Image: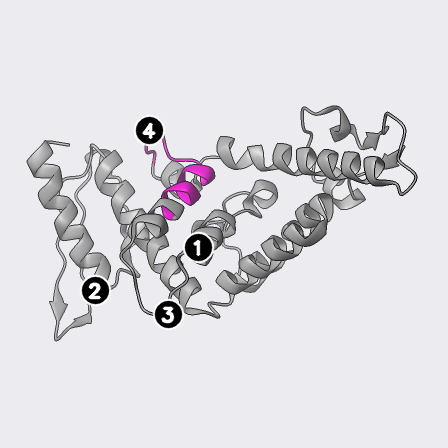
Amino acid sequence: MRCVFSPNLLRSGWRGNHPRSIGIHATGGSASPDGTVLKESENAASAIDFLTLCRRLKTTKRKGWINHGIKGPESIADHMYRMALMALIAGDLPGVNRERCIKIAIVHDIAEAIVGDITPSDGVPKAEKSRREQTALNEMCEILGGIRAEEIKELWAEYENNSSIEASLVKDFDKVCVVFVAHMTLDEFLTHSVYVIGGVDSSSIEYEMEHEKVLDEFFISTTGIIICFNNLLRKQKQKYDL
């Protein structure tokens, strides 16, 4: 038998539903002379542990929406899946690896399975937020192990450091996703005014919400491309009475 969770992760209070989540695993069956059966069994069990932990991405709601009292807020998994679909259906761009964009979108918030969704309202410095997420990512990848764990680390770091054109594009998807969700899920949404001067985003965004809910923090970083997307969404919303 072997312990599969590090002390730090156990101290974080996480408990999964799989038998191995208690930290002990007994490998059944007899191994082949070269140990292949044993190795495959351990790899499968590690994958189950990893996926069980990732389940929290589905059950943890995005805190930004919760803080503003939005009913039925999206989960972290909802957010990442929507971004992955954006990458899948986006038009072809020279020099951009679509598959890598999809992968980055799928893993960019994966560490939140442990640390949760940390928002500016939490008052956590950016460096500390990054440190917590890096530690959580290392914990998760230690559980998974193998080349896929290393790939996840690489993809996550690429996004975090904005070190490629793919990472930059996915960051834009992240912002577009916020605008999309705001339009599609906020029945309280009433007005949205954006002013762009000289092609440079100097947006002034005004929201009048029922119950005095304000979502300014979501749109402070709005860029030109998102403004265009926002205007299109407004037209579609009126067309389909969404």
Residue 116 or 231: which is nearer the viewer? 231
Measured along the vertical axis of the image, is residue 120 above or below residue 49? below
Q: In this figure, which residue is indicated by the disc labeled 3?
A: 95
Q: Earlier in the sequence, mark 3 or mark 2?
A: 3
Q: In this figure, which residue is indicated by the disc labeled 1?
A: 99
Q: In this figure, which residue is indicated by the disc labeled 2?
A: 224
Question: Which span is picked out in magenta?
Answer: 69-83
Q: In this figure, which residue is indicated by the disc labeled 4?
A: 71
Residue 28 drawn in magenta: no
Crowd around label 2: few <14 · some 14–19 · many ≥20 (10 Å): some
Q: Earlier in the sequence, mark 2 or mark 4?
A: 4
Q: Nearer the viewer, mark 2 or mark 4?
A: 2
Amino acid of disc 1:
Glu
Circle 3 SS class: loop
Mark 2 and mark 1: span between their CA atoms?
25 Å
Mark 3 and mark 2: span between their CA atoms?
22 Å
Give me the disc on residue 49. none
Residue 77 drawn in magenta: yes
Residue 139 or 106: which is nearer the viewer? 106
Mark 4 and mark 3: span between their CA atoms?
40 Å
Question: Left or right: where does residue 203 sit relative to residue 219?
Answer: left
Q: Quadrant of residue 196?
A: bottom left
Q: Earlier in the sequence, mark 4 or mark 3?
A: 4
Question: Left or right: where does residue 140 sit relative to residue 27?
Answer: left
Circle 4 SS class: loop
Amino acid of disc 4:
Lys
